[in-house]
Amino acid sequence: MERRKALLVGIDNYSGSNQLKGCVNDARELAELFAWHGDGSKNFDVEVLTAPLPNADGSFTDADDPDTEHVCKKEGFSKDLLRDRIKALFMGDVDIALFYFSGHGSLTSVGGKLITTDIKLAEDGLPMSDILEWANKSATQEKIIILDCCHSGDFGSSNADRNVSEISHGMVVMTAALPSEEAKENNGGVAHGVFTDLLAEALNGAAADLLGQITPGSIYHYVDEALGSWEQRPVFKTNITRWTPLRQVQPEVPLQRLHKICQHFPDPDKERNLTPAYIASAPDSDPASVEIMKDLQAFAGVDLVVPVGEEHMYQAAMNSKSCKLTALGKRYWRLVKHHRL
């Protein structure tokens, strides 16, 4: 079993007009998604650090999960605490270490900074370059950095040339905005960062493939398509040789059924002939053919198979037409054929 750990940070409690509303919500929602797969099985070992705004009476709402979340109350969230926990995240030799930050970020003459409650001047924030150094030197096999803050796209940039990235092998970086841009919070409902709202949708299954696997690449593709050209632009930087799923949800087609695709289409370029015997309600239905039809209709439902000459699989069978694999169907056919699934 893979050893996975994640540190998620959300800071709302800044001074004066710098207060935020959705960062604690961001960290708490993602913590739940990263801690558990869609079927309830364990995923990451999660640590959550939050600095919420005080209630109207000056009190603070307790953590949703006191076993994993540390709420920084009156004293707020310090730079020293953030530094110590990030360094601890990248210590040791685990399979995956994931760092997520939602709060204020800044871009100074020496690069990007993460801002904590105690920081008064942007120049005094925690340098993104320090975090990059700790991650680059870590023995952890795969490092995932996700930042929802202003100017977050500067993470990973070379100090010598801001247009060059210096990320080690096994690292994935996803950020909410370009180095020059601000990251926005939504205006309605429960407050969240615009980027994290989409990230949560992706992790809930919107970015899953047919097997229910959600990878960094599929997450970024989902977020990128959802944000228009005039909106904040997310940034994606990688130095990897494989996609490792960050979360698993219920697959659209069970793997056991998907494995039958080569049985039903021995040659991926040839059509499969259908007859009324494939339809359970037909007078001359055949039980074995009816079972095959269930698989074919499931494949059609996820665009692996299409009827030929008819709009629906039922009509194709009743009119003795055929069906064929789509381009996506041929892709999964090859994966099954070569024992990649």
Image (cartoon, rainbow, N blue to C red):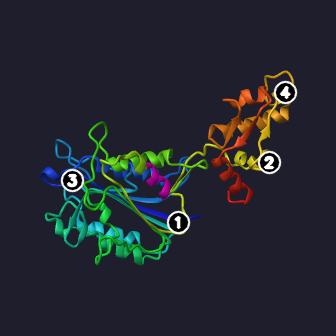
Crowding around mark 1 (Cα neighbors within 10 Å: few <14, some 14 to 19, many 20+) is few
Going from N to C along the chain, the mark reached first, 1 or 4, is 1
Q: x and y percent of residue 82 in the render?
A: 29, 66
Give above or below for 202 relative to 306: below
Amino acid type at mark 1: Arg
Numbered range of the magenta stretch = 216-222
Q: Secondary structure at mark 3?
A: loop
Q: Nearer the viewer, residue 282 or 329?
A: 329
Amino acid type at mark 3: Asn
Residue at figure coordinates x 14%, y 65% from the top left: 121
| Quadrant occupied by the N terminus | bottom right
Residue at figure coordinates x 14%, y 50% from the top left: 17
Q: Is residue 323 left or right of residue 57?
A: right
Q: Is residue 232 left or right of residue 42?
A: left
Mark 1, residue position: 3
Mark 2, residue position: 263
Going from N to C along the chain, the mark reached first, 1 or 2, is 1
Membership of 218 in magenta stretch: yes
Q: Secondary structure at mark 4?
A: loop
Amino acid type at mark 2: Gln
Going from N to C along the chain, the mark reached first, 2 or 3, is 3
Q: x and y percent of residue 124 in the render?
A: 18, 69
How far is mark 1 from mark 4, CA to CA? 51 Å
Going from N to C along the chain, the mark reached first, 4 or 3, is 3
Q: Nearer the viewer, residue 123 or 19?
A: 123
Going from N to C along the chain, the mark reached first, 2 or 4, is 2
Crowding around mark 3 (Cα neighbors within 10 Å: few <14, some 14 to 19, many 20+) is many
Which of the two discs, 1 and 4, sits closer to the camera?
4
| Quadrant occupied by the C terminus | bottom right
* Residue 13: mark: 3
Mark 4, residue position: 285
